[in-house]
Amino acid sequence: MIEESNFVRRHWFHDLLSQPFYGRNAASIRQRILFLLIGNCVLLGFIYARSIQTEGVSFLSEVALIPVALAPVVIAGLGLTGIIYAGGIDLSISTIIVVAGTVFGILFHNQASPAVCFAGCFLTAVALSSFNGLLVRLLRISPIIVTLAGLQFYRGLALILADWSIPNFGGSLTVQADAYQTPAQQYAWQILAVTVVVSLIWEAYGKTHRKFLALGCSREACRIAGLHPDRITQTSYTVGGLFLGIAALLFVTNQQVIEPARMAQGFELKVIAAVVLGGTNIFGGEGSMLGTVLGALFLYLIEPAMIYAGVSEYYRTAIPGFMIVAVISIDCALHRRQKLLDELR
Amino acid sequence: MPPPLLRLSDISKSFGGVEALKPFSLELEAGTVLGLVGENGAGKSTLIKLLSGLHRPDGGQIALAGRPCSFGSPKEALDAGIATIQQELEYASHLTVAENLLLGETWPRTFFGGVNWRSLYAEAEQRLRDFGIELPVRSLMSRLTAAEKQEVAIAGALARRARLLILDEPTASLSEPEVARLLTHLKRLRDQGVTLIYVSHRLDEIFEITDRIAVLRDGELVATHETKQVSAGQIVHDMVGRPLEQVYPRTRSGQTGEVLLQLDGLTRAGMFEDVSLSVRAGEIVGLAGLVGAGRSELARAVYGLYATDRGTVRICGRQWPLSGPDRALRRGLVYIPEERKRQGLVLDHSLGSSLSIGLRDSLSRLGVIRPRREQVKVQEMISRYDIRATGPEQLIGTLSGGNQQKALLARWLERDPQVIILDEPTRGVDVGAKAEIHAVIDRLAAAGKAVLFISSDLPEVLGMSDRVLVMNRGTIETELRGERMTEHNVMLAASGLDIE
């Protein structure tokens, strides 16, 4: 039972735009994307309605806050989506950012130029993420275990590095110079927009992500087809590292004080939540980058919406967690009928 | 004279000291079809794995078209021209058909360096057309039927210029018309000069398609026959090493008792409609039909796994509200499912715990299992159902398919049910184990149980049953008894045609 016939002549834009960006996904993911799109519009609409009623607040200033806060989650999410596509996971992204931030702070402390600091931060994240891939490959241990260990280890590594390189390291590094803060303070939305657009086009027209998905679906099929599963795993972590490098840069340059022991706590869970909410299967093999972007936006928008709705602070902590489950279960309930039919076939 | 396409000289393979394949030689001419038969564990899969590059032989040589070759990976075997279509196909279910076809190859690119999806789809369509089929290449692989997925796999192998195509139990999950379709494709390939090795338990297919038949038993090549000059009896004899005198046992008296299972107008929209049937004590009723006719769905509904829209079920004369498997079990009805790996067994549990898992209540006191009683019971079950294993500690996943199925039967039958629904109990099981399972089923009926027997294997369902119900598109098309119980009639009814 196949609903669409292939023998109908298609309009040119179908192959160029609609199919690669949207149509190639499974129906459940397409539905999730639409669902999140509507959800985001509703939240934005609510925020708009409340902000014009409230004095001293403008909707535009509210929206202008979005890129700085959202960029690290979205960009790290795009990288993690690729890793999860390929059947892996990285729980240590938050502490990789911590190490990258510490390297940034150390370089700053040694009076390196801003460009050197940025490069150091970016490359540290790429290197550590690739190192995760290497460990998963060589040790043949489940990625969830390797990166869970990494989550602990890298934070310690950051503290050790700081302690080594900086005499009288007091637990925090202060970076107060505008030139060192340009990525987050001045170019956040440009970087975010370019990264999102580039990665969506790459997903639509590149082969890399299709290989990740193939690996996530069936390692054996990849092996039989003559692909090298280990190499694909490695690529997914390295590519994830590139995204994580940009995310780290935006995260770190948004801070005045770098505090390795406390920085970015729980960040990895925010990112994973965005990926899962975006419809990506946590066990790999199917998903969507567009979904991740929308998922991250949705999780972000809940916060201001709750504030406008006058929800008390304690509830504001609990509600996003509740929303994740609510969104996914409503979505599943909507396509359960379809799924049942699929299973019976 | 050109060298044979494939020549195996003295190849052998052992695993941890156990000889899986004893040294043997075999030649295969281009454009011919070799049937490879043998019971489970006879060494067929080992041979296939050697040829497809998953294992390396310990000794001997594989020569393809006269050139010796050695494969370190499936990719190397594929490049040399040997493609294997596994029984359990491996594919990326969430990628499109086109991507699966071209996985592992270079994809067409556009001027900007991106994948040129249009030409990718066109290429995939072309490959399928070369093979003689048309499928929507843009849909996800998971949306295809099992037969279509297999066709995609074969088309993909041919596009990579496979000269030798190995098919491992290709028809295990296909319905009769799909099997016919596959065999037509294969005959055409043979005529085009592709060499085939066809591995199957189903001898009728082997006889239909092959030129020669090689029989493996216990890792040894016991015989090769020209297909035209050998009888099925001879092949079975070679496979089991003993003549199979009584293929379908019948120790039951034929006396039937009261109706133990009765369905009246049972309906679930989209699955089955207005199904009425009854099974008496001491009776085996066959339920035949094509895959997708609604037989398993009906059985699962009776077991309480699906809700029904209309109709009633009576078990042992009492109305049964269809409220779930646990209550069905208490009423005395068991359903032994089709896909034993997914639905019936925990593969990495030991045989012992798998056998006793359903009996814990009777083996425990105050919630604590009494290990000695459990042990005794398990040993008794292993010997009674003739389960071949190294002991109760052996992991169930490492048993052969036939023994897994016997273990599953043993587990359920120990609860002494009155009504037993068996769904394809002998699928993927070798000839010897099949006969033992048949004997167990016959003994059940002889002991006064009511058995509803679902099978797609026509000779089996006809041979085992006292009468056969044929389902087609969710309804019971007809009931066949006595002389009308022929393969011909079942096929006609299953396809919705009138019986002559």
Image: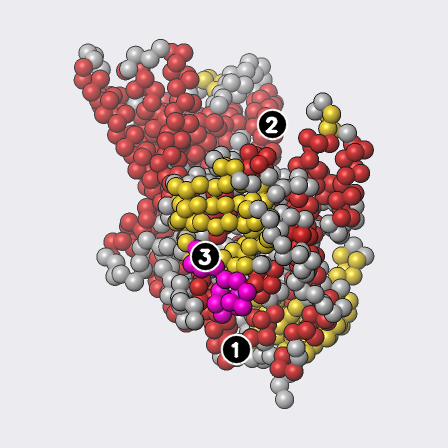
Q: Between tags 1 and 2, which lies in front?
A: 1
**Upstream in sequence: badge 1 or badge 3:** 1
Q: Is residue B409 above or below residue A61?
A: below
Mark linked to residue B345:
none
Q: Is residue B484 magenta?
A: yes
Q: Residue at x 57, y 63 (%)?
A: B462
- SS assignment at label 1: helix
Quarter of the N terminus of chain A within the rendering: bottom left
Please state which of residues B289 and B416 is positioned toward the viewer in this rendering.
Answer: B416
Q: Please, what is the three-letter code of the amino acid marked with disc 3?
A: Met
Q: Is residue A255 visible?
A: yes
Q: Residue at x 26, y 27 (%)?
A: A42
Q: Between tags 2 and 3, which lies in front?
A: 3
Q: Residue at x 48, y 50 (%)?
A: B277
Quarter assignment of residue A317: top left
State the image coordinates of residue B215 (x, y, percent, origin top left). Answer: 69, 71
Q: Residue at x 60, y 63 (%)?
A: B463
> What residue did someone put label 2 on?
A153
Q: Residues within 10 Å of mark 2 (few under 14, many from 20)?
A: some
Q: Check chain identity for marks 1 and 3: say if they share one.
A: yes
Please state which of residues A314 and A232 is positioned toward the viewer in this rendering.
Answer: A314
> What residue did someone put label 3 on?
B471
Q: Please, what is the three-letter code of the amino acid marked with disc 1?
A: Arg
Kindly identify which chain the residue marked by label 1 belongs to. Answer: B
- Range of the magenta residues? B476-490
Kindly identify which chain the residue marked by label 2 belongs to. Answer: A
State the image coordinates of residue B372 (x, y, percent, origin top left). Answer: 81, 33
> What residue did someone put label 1 on?
B190
Please state which of residues B335 and A310 is positioned toward the viewer in this rendering.
Answer: B335
Q: Is residue A48 left or right of residue B5?
A: left
Q: Is residue B380 magenta?
A: no
Q: Please, what is the three-letter code of the amino acid marked with disc 2?
A: Phe
